[in-house]
Image (cartoon, rainbow, N blue to C red):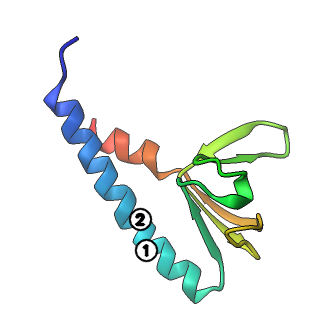
Amino acid sequence: MAESLAHRWGQIIGDVFEVFVRNILADVAKRHDLYLDFKRPRKARGGQGKVTWQDGYGNKHDLDYVLERGGTEDTLGVPDSFWPTAQRARSLAA
């Protein structure tokens, strides 16, 4: 199967965008005493790498970032805001 260089370039742009947003959200979290959750293994999620939350209708959503009140590495907090930035980054890079 052929590899598209444009696709790879889009992935790089998306990755850089995600790190940029993570740094901004980390500052916001620090200023407002929130916990920033993002894609990586976390004890509170049973070591799972994906950030998944369930809405009031029982639907599960994979997210890039969640700001939580009272969250820690070991405890899930109450979600304050959800940030699904990867979809936006992919659409910008496409």
Q: Is residue 87 left or right of residue 9?
A: right
Q: Name the residue furthest left.
A: 5
Q: Secondary structure at mark 2?
A: helix
Image position of 60 (left or right of 8): right
Task: Name the residue: 63% across, 85% down.
Answer: 32
**Placement of the C terminus among the 4 image quadrants:** top left
Q: Pinpoint residue 41: horizontal percent, then vertical percent.
A: 58, 54
The image position of residue 79, as x and y in percent, is 73, 64
Residue under the image location 76 percent in, 76 percent down: 70
Q: Which residue is mark 2?
A: 21
The disc labelled 1 sits on which kind of residue?
Answer: Ile
Q: Is residue 23 left or right of residue 26?
A: left
Q: At which x and y percent is residue 83?
A: 55, 57
Q: Tag 1's secondary structure? A: helix
Tell me: residue 78, above or below residue 60.
Answer: below
**Pointer 1: what residue?**
24
Contact check, label 2 and label 1, Cβ < 8 Å: yes
Disc 2 marks a residue whose amino acid type is Val
Identify the mark at residue 59; answer none if there is no mark. none
Quarter of the image where one finds residue 71: bottom right
In the rendered view, tell whether residue 60 sits above or below residue 25: above
